[in-house]
Amino acid sequence: MENTRALLGFFTSGDEAFLVAQGLKTTAIRMKEHQERALEIARWLEAQPEVVSVLHPALPSHPDHALFKRDFTGSGSLFGVVLKPAPRASVAAFVDGLELFTIGYSWGGYESLCLPVKLGKNRTAKPWTEQGNLFRLHIGLEGVDDLKADLAAAIARYAQAR
């Protein structure tokens, strides 16, 4: 009993434990899908004119790609995209009209998420020097073409508000 409590946590209910066990059965399949979809969208974003950079270590353009290839066998669904510098109104225009992406922190669910991020003094290991607005994206299990269309419309709104 003590070992179970230590592994699952003191306040884990039977229902929560059941849901975790159910989710673990399909984790490998879901992570493979998340990885493939995220990489496809990251590559697509690299080709968009408003994009300054895509921060995904599985992409050859990432400065730490060699380390990624050395140490990992796959990637996840969370990455960053930096758009050209623009005022706060552009950031609002980007996120306010999203239809499939919602704003949130739950990186790892089946739904796609977007979060505008303003890095500054809270980044202490290495100063943030990238010019532009950073968005963190979690690519869920929706249709890739639908997600691209949602992002394309968001990028167009962003550029128009600039």
Image (tube, grey):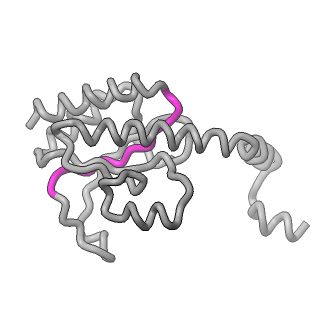
What span is colored magenta in the figure? Answer: 131-142
The spot of residue 60 in percent (x, y) is: 35, 54
Residue 85 shown left or right of residue 153 in the figure: left
The spot of residue 93 in percent (x, y) is: 20, 33
Residue 139 shown left or right of residue 28 in the figure: left
Q: Quadrant of residue 131?
A: bottom left
Q: Nearer the viewer, residue 150 or 70?
A: 70
In the rendered image, the residue lying farthest to the right is 1
In the rendered view, tell whether residue 126 sits above or below residue 142.
below
User: Is residue 100 within the magenta segment?
Assistant: no
Residue drawn 41% across the image and 35% down it: 102
Q: Quadrant of residue 122?
A: bottom left
User: Is residue 141 within the magenta segment?
Assistant: yes
Residue drawn 79% across the image and 69% down it: 6
Q: Nearer the viewer, residue 153 or 115?
A: 153
Q: Nearer the viewer, residue 12 or 66?
A: 66
Counting labels gives 0
The spot of residue 90 in percent (x, y) is: 16, 38
Give the quadrant of the C terminus: top left
Residue 30 shown left or right of residue 79 in the figure: right
In the rendered view, tell whether residue 121 sits above or below residue 34.
below
The spot of residue 133 in percent (x, y) is: 20, 50
Residue drawn 26% across the image and 61% down it: 119
